Amino acid sequence: MEALTGTPPEATVPATVVDLGSSSVRDLNQALHAPDAALRATHWRVLNPRGAHSVACGLTEDLSVDIEGHVGYYCAGMNQRATVAVHGNAGVGVAENMMSGTVRVRGNASQSAGATAHGGLIVVEGDAAARCGISMKGVDIVVGGSVGHMSAFMGQAGRLVVCGDAGDGLGDSLYEARLYVKGTVKSLGADCVEKPVREEHLAELAELLKAAEIDEDPAAFRRYGSARGLYHFQVDNAGAY
Amino acid sequence: MYDDLSALGLRESATFDRATIHGIQRAATTGVYDIRGWGAKRRLPHFDDLLFLGASMSRYPLEGYRERCGTDVILGTRNARYPLHLDIPVTIAGMSFGSLSANAKEALGRGATTAGTSTTTGDGGMTPEERGQSKTLVYQYLPSRYGMNPDDLRKADAIEVVLGQGAKPGGGGMLLGQKITDRVAGMRTLPVGVDQRSACRHPDWTGPDDLTIKILELREITDWEKPVYVKIGATRTYYDVKLAVHAGADVVVVDGMQGGTAATQEVFIEHVGIPTLAAIPQAVQALQELGVHRQVQLIVSGGIRTGADVAKAIALGADAVAIGTAALIALGDNHPRHDAEYRALGSAAGYFDDFQDGRDPAGISTQDEVLAARLDPVEGGRRLANYLRVLTMEAQTIARACGKAHLHHLEPEDLVALTLESAAMARVPLAGTDWIPGAHP
Ligand SMILES: Cc1cc2nc3c(=O)[nH]c(=O)nc-3n(C[C@H](O)[C@H](O)[C@H](O)COP(=O)(O)O)c2cc1C
């Protein structure tokens, strides 16, 4: 791989630069996965991603990766421990099944952002499309803008914070994920209800917004969660299934 | 009793037989559809409807215990750095921890390892018992992503992207609350005791073009080491296999409608999908037309019981088969020694299919600690290994009789069909004729 060295003038820590204009995603990921931690730089810059898929996926170490441009599907997929920033928009399934670490999208994110993710923090500074946080299993997701329809569908655990509006069917078939929305909710999905915001919720929101570095007043949000009415199959609920 | 009634001149309706009448009565009483385990119970065209033409004048057979008849199979040669090399072409199908006890999963791993084959995780993730006892373990990647963990993905020997199962193509999963114990709930990140629904579609991709990108992601995460399988329930098999190959599958798993399940609506099990026999030639045709038959391997499941079934599936073009229900029976499922307990549950030995219910007297499809302790994983593993060896020896017996030095040398030309339906589906001639119904000369 060429261009494995070089320090961008604006970076504080010397970064290893990989230019996807000349290197492949395979080369990049292989280098990021290299087993010998001592040989590995802790700060990486990825240039010219040009919508490539699977950029910086499957990371396991405490690395910091700045991607300078737009990425395709599954950027930072299954991330563990690493901090990945996309200075652009992200395609489908950004940080899908993330376990830990932080993924930040400076632009907008496509469908299924943070799908099934188990842990860590995902920040989308712009909007996220449909199914944001689908089947989320413990991740925290903070969206600066709005989310599309069926967000947090079957959400099992974790928290979704939406500073804009939510589309149709928010929290459909929700298990135990907690949802906060500042703007309007077009409609709630089956078994998702508004719940009172208590002190502990304000505190949790303040913490999440702070971690996401997003300046919003926790008191402006409403909370939604599972009515737990579909937890056991009952024929009287047939219309909701 | 039946005879007594017919002596009275009473006649059972073929349309409304006793099971049908009971089903209507049950629906009227409960207001809920019937959910059960096992696979389709209706009679379907199957491997029993095919026969082998042994060697005689124009072909000569191999000597029973003297001449070699190879049984090994290599899976995942297309893209993976480390393809799997199995001693026998009979693998253990994916069955979830949750539907099965930890002891049962361990026993499956032990039996498979002893016999030189692979076993597979299921919906709900990988348990240490199963990884520890399975030399070769395939990790399922399912729509629910319950317990999906990149560390486990990297520990696996192959990855199986599950689109569907033969018992319920187009359906999601279900694990009823009584089986969601602390451990199962913890692995799936769910509250204890709730009915768990598994999605029917993957949450972050739809359609073959997305699948291509998803498979690339899985390869990137695992550094192109592992074979990637794609498992489909048999429906539009010809097209689905072509699309799976285009999407990059190294191995395609086709599960026919007889395939077992842990918990599915009866109406789904019996009325959706096509028989295994009909699916195999479609899959093989798709692979042949793409020029990848035997390069992209085909694993077939759904109703495999005997070495004859194994040999027939391979003769029709499969590279290997997978077994679910039969493996559970080998462990002790439906054993007559539990008959009294099966009857107390409203079933009987040989009929028990309430895998969803969690009260399995054999300790297999349960999370109840007392029941699960009845299955000794070492003894269970031994029984499964015995059974796998018998399947292999039976298949070899047939292959030698057909003059084949390897199971993979069996071919459609070795087969004839007993019925018009099976001849048309399997695309082999009706016995005693050269007629393949539906074949275009
Ligand atoms: C108890 C049980 C649990 C199963 N769990 C899964 C599963 O988690 N994932 C899956 O793809 N298939 C699952 N299956 C289907 C099997 O993988 C396989 O397709 C089927 O059992 C093959 O048919 P056979 O039972 O006739 O051998 C399950 C089957 C059974 C009997």
Image: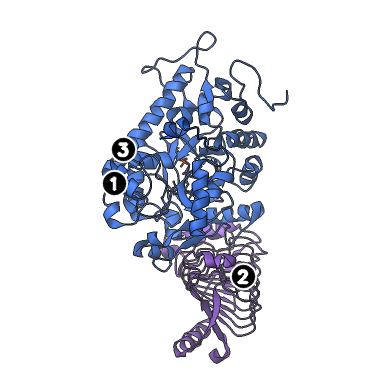
Chain colours: A purple, B blue
Disc 2, SS? loop
Q: Is residue B106 visible?
A: no
Q: Nearer the viewer, residue B73 or B259?
A: B259
What is the distance, in whole Å, between disc 2 and disc 3 at their CAs? 47 Å
- Give the residue at the far front of this rendering: B8
Q: In this rendering, do the residues under marks 2 and 1 share a single chain?
A: no
Q: Give yes or no for contact between labels 2 and 1 (Cβ–Cβ under 8 Å).
A: no
Q: Residue at point 52% right, 56% down?
A: B28
Query: Given the image, what chain letter belongs to the residue carrying mark 3?
Result: B
Disc 1, SS? helix
Q: Residues within 10 Å of mark 1 (few under 14, many from 20)?
A: many
Q: Which residue is mark 1?
A: B377
Q: Give yes or no for contact between labels 2 and 3 (Cβ–Cβ under 8 Å).
A: no
Question: What amino acid type is highlighted by mark number 3?
Answer: Arg
Q: Which residue is mark 3?
A: B383
Q: Give yes or no for contact between labels 1 and 3 (Cβ–Cβ under 8 Å).
A: no
Circle count: 3
Disc 3, SS? helix
What is the distance, in whole Å, between disc 2 and disc 1 at their CAs? 43 Å
Q: Which residue is mark 2?
A: A150
Q: Is residue B317 visible?
A: yes
